Amino acid sequence: MWVARKVVFQRHLFFILLLAGMAAALHAARADTDPLPSWNEGAAKQNVIDFVVRVTKDGGADFVPQAQRVAVFDNDGTLWAEQPVYFQLAFAMDTIKSLAHLHPEWSTKQPFKAVIEGDHKALAESGDDGLQTILATTHVGMSTDTFGDLVDAWMLSAEHPRFKRPYNTLVYQPMLELLSYLRVNGFKTFIVSGGGVEFMRRFAEETYGIPPEQVVGSSGVVKYEIDNDGKPSLVKEAKVEFVDDGPGKPVGINRFIGRRPIAAFGNSDGDLQMLQWTCSAPGARFCLYVHHTDADREWAYDRNSRIGKLDKGLDEAAAKGWTVVDMKQDWKSVFPPDK
Amino acid sequence: MWVARKVVFQRHLFFILLLAGMAAALHAARADTDPLPSWNEGAAKQNVIDFVVRVTKDGGADFVPQAQRVAVFDNDGTLWAEQPVYFQLAFAMDTIKSLAHLHPEWSTKQPFKAVIEGDHKALAESGDDGLQTILATTHVGMSTDTFGDLVDAWMLSAEHPRFKRPYNTLVYQPMLELLSYLRVNGFKTFIVSGGGVEFMRRFAEETYGIPPEQVVGSSGVVKYEIDNDGKPSLVKEAKVEFVDDGPGKPVGINRFIGRRPIAAFGNSDGDLQMLQWTCSAPGARFCLYVHHTDADREWAYDRNSRIGKLDKGLDEAAAKGWTVVDMKQDWKSVFPPDK
């Protein structure tokens, strides 16, 4: 009802509902033929469709066998939003708050006090050490199962500060359609993200239709332990194992997927090497950047942003002819309708 | 023709061909109903089938949704043979020989001299350092693409010393049938092996029907590099990154697959933790050890073997009621017929 609240006028309610009904019917009819109904007509949409047609046309010069149709997607800023802070950091801070009643000592101890009181100034002053403490408290020293339960609980209860919706509803409707369009055309879709792999795997299947084994991300060291009753568990340790960002993305692709993608989708300089790796190989290739240009419906940021900085990538996309989505221009809607 | 050469008698050629035709027809008819034709009737075969029926029976107490039907297989000694040396070591030594003409200095330098001359005594004397040198020379300091080409070339040309067949034909026919049977029943099949992930991925798809992204293995550090022409490559460095053996197997499963398997197949103590991790969770689970008991058709080894030692695992399988395949007893044939 989040969109509807803005457009409902009492006086013309009947006519508006009538129009809405007609629009919905039209939309349903067109969806049969248009695989990307939330994309406006234009170069970005056309490039996507042209590429898919080329690589799937049996006997065509650019045909790619189904097993090799690997498409990789960044997550933060490409499949879901990443402002005002990465959602995984929101998870960490919300989880500190939800655990505070078990830790009375936090009420006088930084950075916990700042998180609990929403004191952004004190939080910023705690710096990288403070951030590390917040992440360590919420991400390590527990079994993978316990961590998964924390993520699930947060996703069910937390609300985004601006949109007042669960975080896993702040995904880009046009990208959901794109994922589905690629899969219908025989692509295997993977997430390749700097985010924590165990965090993303808790919602990627339900949210994006991407199963855990197709999620590549950053990870900490995990240790196999057996307790006194002979019950094994995997315990998350306070040691970084792999950072799946920048040059780490092609490395992660090689390690987890073991073949070079033919299509890659990102939104920041952290995705640049993944796009280079994908589009520098011979044969039909597709690289796309989502450019955040819509401060009204989402956010507008690029070259000078602290989160999701897109600077070198924008230049390289222009030089190499990669597709750049202008979110404001190219997307009819940004998020799925609120339920 | 490798089997046929042994059974063809000129005098009764006609009758033998007739019988062969009848046998083939019978085999084809039975294959429609028997998913595991190379398995003799017995507990091992029955346990496999019972498990698959239980977890796939819609509405049954042990039903498992298709997305959660994850089955993991060790490779060396479970899907293909591992004697007289791990096949990846044979690859390394054969590759040294094939590269020797480019390295005249090797003819006087250990361990290369020993490998080239097939001098097992000198090779053994070169110890772990010698082994490291052999592996480093054939596995690192090159791009992932170059390494892949080396593996492909070896697989096409090399012959196993005992069976005089290509290594990728020394796979277990009963296990190929098992892989296929599980997949037909909605399982996703993964390799989880101590072997090198980039080595296995070169043949796993063709040999086992397991795509690269479903192969988990040991790995070295790989680095993303861009040359002066702007062409990126991934270069294999001389640093171990991950050993997917013993307690590393559940860790590798967690990292790469992200969900707990419901079925696990191994043959050595290096697979024990993978089987523990799989079968200690609630719900229907299946764990199986292949026990090498057939010196005539393959090899017989277990508790005291240097390669594929199966000692603790054999005890734990008995204690926990896991299925143990007696290769001699339970398998009608071991390898696929030679072509």
Image: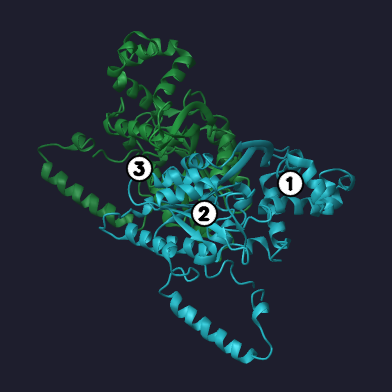
Chain colours: A cyan, B green
Q: Position of residue A194 (x, y in %)?
A: 58, 46
Q: Residue at x 71, y 66 (%)?
A: A164
Secondary structure state at the residue bearing disc 2: loop
Disc marking residue B82: none
Secondary structure state at the residue bearing disc 1: helix
Q: What residue does disc 3 label?
A: B207
| Above or below, B114 relative to A3 | above
Q: What chain does mark 2 sit on?
A: B
Contact (Cβ within 8 Å) of mark 3 with mark 1: no
**Pointer 3 and pointer 2 on the same chain:** yes
Q: Residue at x 42, y 48 (%)?
A: A319
Q: What chain does mark 3 sit on?
A: B
* Furthest residue toward left: B11
Amino acid under disc 1:
Thr
Q: How far apart are labels 2 and 1 at the CA level? A: 30 Å
Q: How many circles with numbers are drawn on the protein?
A: 3
Q: Position of residue B167 (x, y in %)?
A: 33, 33
Q: Local crowd at mark 2 within 10 Å, few (<14), some, or many (≥20)? A: many
Q: Local crowd at mark 1 within 10 Å, few (<14), some, or many (≥20)? A: many
Disc marking residue B69: 2
- Which one is closest to the eye, mark 2 or mark 1? 1
Q: How far apart are labels 3 and 1 at the CA level? A: 43 Å
Q: Nearer the viewer, residue A271 or B338?
A: A271
Sequence-wise, the earlier of marks 3 and 2 is 2
Amino acid under disc 2:
Arg
**Pointer 3 and pointer 1 on the same chain:** no
